[in-house]
Image (cartoon, rainbow, N blue to C red):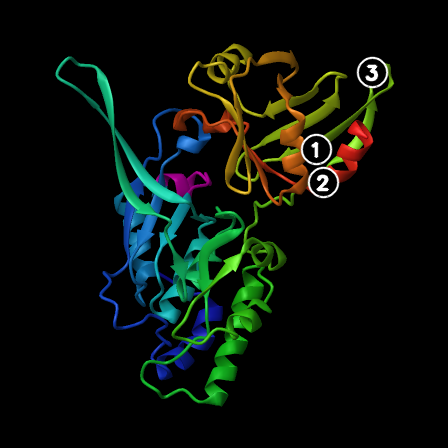
Amino acid sequence: MNIPKFLKNIIFFFIYLLAFSTFNSADKVEALEFRDVSPCHGTAATCAPYIVASGEIQVDDDKKLDNYLKKEGWIKLLNSNASFRICFNSKGGNMLGAIKLGEYIRSKNIDTCLLESYENVEIYLDQNKKKQSSIEEIADKPVCASACFFAFVGGINRIIEDFDGDTYLGVHQFFSDNKTGNESNAQSLSAYLSIYLDRMDIDRSILDYASLTPPDQITYLPISIISEYKIDTTRNFLVPWNLEIIDDNQLVGFVSQRHSNKNAITKLILSNEGTFSKLYIVFSPQNNRSQNEILDILNSSYYHLELYLDNENIFKQKTVWKHINNNKFLCSVNIPKYILLKIKKGKALNLKYDVANAYRDIEPSTKISLEGFNKVYLALFN
């Protein structure tokens, strides 16, 4: 496999420093391995298989991935220009190997991801010839830290799931295990890494942020940093609440939030109905499912609309969805005033309407900003 010209110019430097291994050698970790994962059963985009890369990054993992893609048939997707993901679970490894892997991923237009968990779903026939499924948990709260960060940023699209504002994407100062590095070498390496990050469309000042953490520690990046340094290419900023006048000159509060992991919008509309307050949810998924199929799924008896405020469940109710126009679906619930007062004092609001894995492309669940909510509350109820 041809090495990019950019890498040829710096390989000699990395060899001199033994490639700056950024993995703690005291940890007994297997070398990086690749495996296929099917997250759910179905034809939805969210059920598309992906690759999980787990273990310590080695200097030749770009070649290992190239061979894996050819062996496992992924090369057909590459040749058809179809997109797919490689999701990481690695605490680091060889810096040169990570950059070569990132370069390879970019050259093949592959996406990268760091999700909340990795699960593989297998479908089989039981003794009665009925389809059954088994779920294998591959990793819960996987990590991509140290050198892994530089492999991860090679993705054309980079997807990071957060945990209440935090992630498991970690950085620190780079270091040399063989103690041959000096200040001049470190400065040169920093310059090369800056050029690499520029090529990956990452703000190079992330290196300054990483330099604040000693090499034997890890700082996991908060969402604010993920957004500021353009690391997650799919993340949408939370939209604040606002006021508008609708039919019959009625004043309502609303927030319209685009989803970061699928092509969909969830809009919340809050109104004062006199003796009670009502929350309308308008969900607009963009996919190829029929209106009847979407309604059947949303109105399954298993699902409830829930509100979580600062990780606490404050509201749960069964809802009935209906189709209103185009690809928009509506449901509504009566919200007690004491719930609104709680929301008024909260920091983070999540609307939950969990559906089966196979239907994640039509799941209305999303994070909701509370910026502007006080203004809406005062305008509607005072």
Distance Cα–Cα, label 2 vs label 1: 6 Å
Distance Cα–Cα, label 1 vs label 3: 18 Å
Q: Earlier in the sequence, mark 1 or mark 3?
A: 3
248 horizontally vs 198: left or right: right
- Residue type at numbered disc 2: Pro
Q: Residue at x 51, y 59 (%)?
A: 221
Distance Cα–Cα, label 3 vs label 2: 22 Å
306 horizontally vs 31: left or right: right
Q: Residue furthest left?
A: 127
- Residue 330: x, y in percent? 62, 17
Provide the residue span drawn in magenta: 76-84
Disc 2 target residue: 240
Q: Residue at x 48, y 83 (%)?
A: 186
Q: Residues within 10 Å of mark 2 (few under 14, many from 20)?
A: some
Provide the secondary structure element on which disc 1 rests. strand
- Residue 18: x, y in percent? 33, 79
Q: Is residue 228 above or below residue 139?
A: below
Q: Earlier in the sequence, mark 3 or mark 2?
A: 2
Q: Residue at x 44, y 89 (%)?
A: 182
Provide the secondary structure element on which disc 3 rests. helix
- Residue type at numbered disc 3: Asp
Q: Split into 4 quadrants, where in the image is the N terminus? A: bottom left
Disc 1 target residue: 255
Q: Residue 77 lies in magenta, yes or no?
A: yes
Provide the secondary structure element on which disc 2 rests. loop
Q: Are marks 2 and 1 in contact (CB under 8 Å)?
A: yes
